[in-house]
Amino acid sequence: MMLVQALRLHLREGTPTRVGWLAALANGQMSRALAAIHADPARRWALQDLAATAGMSRSTFALRFRETVGETPMDYIARWRMLLAADRLSNTDEPLTAIALSLGYESESAFSTAFKRVIGCSPREHCRRMGTAASDARSVRAAVRADPRG
């Protein structure tokens, strides 16, 4: 909580035209909307729900969110869900269907389509890539342990 307050203070003192997630944290209305999204990413969010959370009209909220965050609320939600999914695909053994359902997708197919649109590859391809990267990182760590001089 203190970190969020410190970031808000820092952003208030900076240039007011900043765009992005940190700029949104400095704005009380946008911050409330982001907190709601992050607290319940699986919820079937509607623009009206987010606007009400921020205490704004739908049209004003949509415009201000895009100006502040740099993307539409629905694009932000999709990206956030896929970042969560990518993390879980890389760091857990959860089945794809369970991840999809937990993030608000009704089918693995709908989830996979959204994942490919946002991340740029299928969930299975992401797992293969991350599996290779994790294997490479383990090899490097093992080599360093075996010969700490590098």
Image (cartoon, rainbow, N blue to C red):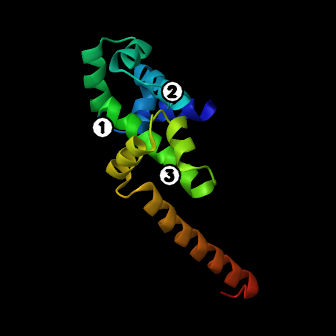
Report x, y in % for residue 19.
Answer: 32, 38
Report x, y in % for residue 39.
Answer: 55, 28
Q: Name the residue under label 2.
A: 35
**Residue at position x 45%, y 55% in the image:** 123
Does residue 133 lie above or below 77 as drawn?
Answer: below
Q: Distance between the residues labelled 2 and 1?
A: 17 Å
* Amino acid under disc 1: Gly
Give the position of the N terminus as an image quadrant: top right
Q: Distance between the residues labelled 1 and 3?
A: 22 Å
Toward the viewer: 76 or 9? 76
Report x, y in % for residue 104.
Answer: 48, 32
Q: Distance between the residues labelled 3 and 2?
A: 20 Å
**Residue at position x 41%, y 19% in the image:** 29
Q: Which mark is first along the chain, 2 or 3?
A: 2
- Labels 1, 3: front one: 3
How many C-alpha atoms fall within 10 Å of the one at disc 1: few (<14), some, or many (≥20)?
A: some
Please give left or right for residue 75 compared with residue 90 in the image: left
Dot 3: what SS?
helix
Dot 1: what SS?
loop
* Amino acid under disc 3: Ala
Q: Name the residue under label 3.
A: 86
| Residues under numbered marks 2 and 1 in contact, where contact means CB atoms less than 8 Å apart | no
Q: Name the residue under label 1.
A: 70
**Residue at position x 53%, y 49% in the image:** 96
- Labels 3, 2: front one: 3
How many C-alpha atoms fall within 10 Å of the one at disc 3: few (<14), some, or many (≥20)?
A: some
How many C-alpha atoms fall within 10 Å of the one at disc 2: few (<14), some, or many (≥20)?
A: few
Dot 2: what SS?
helix
